[in-house]
Amino acid sequence: MAEHLHARIEFDPRFTVAEVPDRLFGSFVEHLGRCVYTGIYEPGHPTANADGLRGDVLDLVAELGPTMIRYPGGNFVSGYRWEDGVGPKEDRPRRLDLAWGTTETNQFGLGEFMKFCRAVGVEPNMAVNLGTRGVQEALDLLEYANHPGGTYWSDLRRSHGDEDPYGIKLWCLGNEMDGPWQIGQRTAAEYGRIADQTARAMRMIDPGLDLVACGSSSRGMPTFGEWEAEVLANSYKSVDYISAHAYYHPGDGDIPSFMASAQDMELFISGVIATADAVGAKLKTDKKIDISFDEWNVWYQEEWEASAHAEWVEAPRQLEDHYSAMDAVVFGSLLITLLRRCDRVTAACLAQLVNVIGPIMTEPGGPAWRQTTFFPFAEASSFGRGQVLHVNADSPRFDTTKYGEVDALHSVAVANADGSVTVFAVNRDLESPLSLEVDTAALGGHGEVTCSTLSDSDPNAKNTLDDPERVTPVENKSVALAEGKVTVELPAMSWNTIRIRPR
Ligand code: AHR
């Protein structure tokens, strides 16, 4: 029989880590598989609006609550000509997309993306191509997007029906330029130089931009650390963020290590911060470079690698992972890490939004539904707003091959503006339930408490087209507040949102 575990946490709303930045709850739309076509965009779908955006997807995106969306890639951007995607649709060229082996019709482009951002009320985050292109094309795109009018590119935008400039503030200077899979991969010195040149030229058009230099594609890259140091040595003064990307999966079936994936994310974050701060120290500047964790998720990558090339078809089913209850718990733990480190991770994007390793799935001409990972993101985006608090935790530990001993309880507390406190807590133990005690003395010890829990007796249970609501969060009736303490039972492998409203 599984052992019953006990853990305890305490916090004080006076002791804060940082305010949760709005950009922490970003997501990502790439021209990849069915993320755009039959994902967010499907003219002719019964719910589509006049712009061809699927109404059922817009509703689910609103419920999910992303704050910012990165576009148009990803690996796709490194071979993309942005001009192909603007102007009359009948004139737009069909092109080979070398990144994913497909044909790109260009029926969706920058103007359609901006309509999507306005429809769901999110900030756009635009990537420029520094793979096959360079400074000039980035400047042309910026002028098209943000200049009010009276010049070639800005007047072209107006002639395409968008009188007002888009005002895009956040820009990625390329994508994963350290990766051998990237079209136009560069060395750190080459990339650092072109990132700096592009950033400085873009700031001549608009000094107020927020610019992201590419960091490592994962902590496992052979150049991790050296890459950040050299890129930032070249571009520290001209950029604001360095990116980080991380995807997790159980690989060889090592589930305990998979449950503890957030350990890798934490080490990744602290390594990048140490490296960036070392460059800043050498430059004798007090400017800090923050992390844009602009791709993170669970991704069963090896399944995709087995069927990589798509024979130049349009919008095939690529990277369509179906997430289990267990995946949602690991995913929630990654969200907890981002919140805990939001003092320096001030932007992040769940990769991706729809169909492609997404929290939302669609059927062409058919329904849309929520994957298991939808729920932790929606709850964190709704209730994880305000000040992240310092938490003292006392947790039992379990052993993992990759990370040694780790805490079974992984948690964060956020003081919300209305005076309540939300605790996100994951029980990472595979088999044992955990009794959690939350000391609420610093909140006055009185009030109301609720808890929502996502777990399943079958860790591999998933939501599917045929059974779209198999796994959903449920009210956890074990939660209670008495004698200044919240107590709650967290099932094995569970994601939990505990809301404490002091009286
Ligand atoms: O999100 C899928 C892919 O993962 C992105 O295109 C790329 O940037 C990363 O390798």
Image: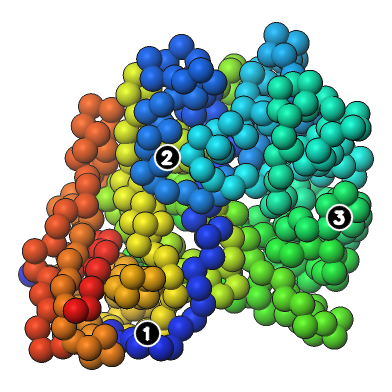
Q: Cβ–Cβ below 8 Å for labels 1 and 2? A: no
Q: Which mark is drawn over residue 13?
A: 1
Give the camera-side residue of 14 and 57. Answer: 14
Residue marked by disc 2: 61
Q: Amino acid at mark 1?
A: Pro
Give the camera-side residue of 1 and 53. Answer: 53
Q: Would residue 38 be visible to someone looking at this image?
A: no
Give the camera-side residue of 255 and 4. Answer: 4
Please tell me which of labels 2 and 3 falls first in the chain: 2
Ligand 1 neighbours mark 1 (CB distance < 8 Å): no
Count all numbered tags in the image, as a single digit: 3
Q: Position of residue 438 (x, y in %)?
A: 22, 82
Which secondary structure, mark 1? strand
Where on the picture, by quarter, is residue 496? bottom left
Q: CA distance from mark 1 to mark 2?
A: 31 Å
Q: Position of residue 321 (x, y in %)?
A: 41, 38
Q: Position of residue 280 (x, y in %)?
A: 79, 79
Please tell me which of labels 1 and 2 falls first in the chain: 1
Q: Amino acid at mark 3?
A: Arg
Where on the picture, by quarter, is residue 408? bottom left
Q: Cβ–Cβ below 8 Å for labels 2 and 3? A: no
Q: CA distance from mark 1 to mark 3?
A: 39 Å
Which quadrant is the C terminus positioned in? bottom left
Q: CA distance from mark 2 to mark 3?
A: 32 Å
Residue marked by disc 3: 203
Which quadrant is the N terminus positioned in? bottom left
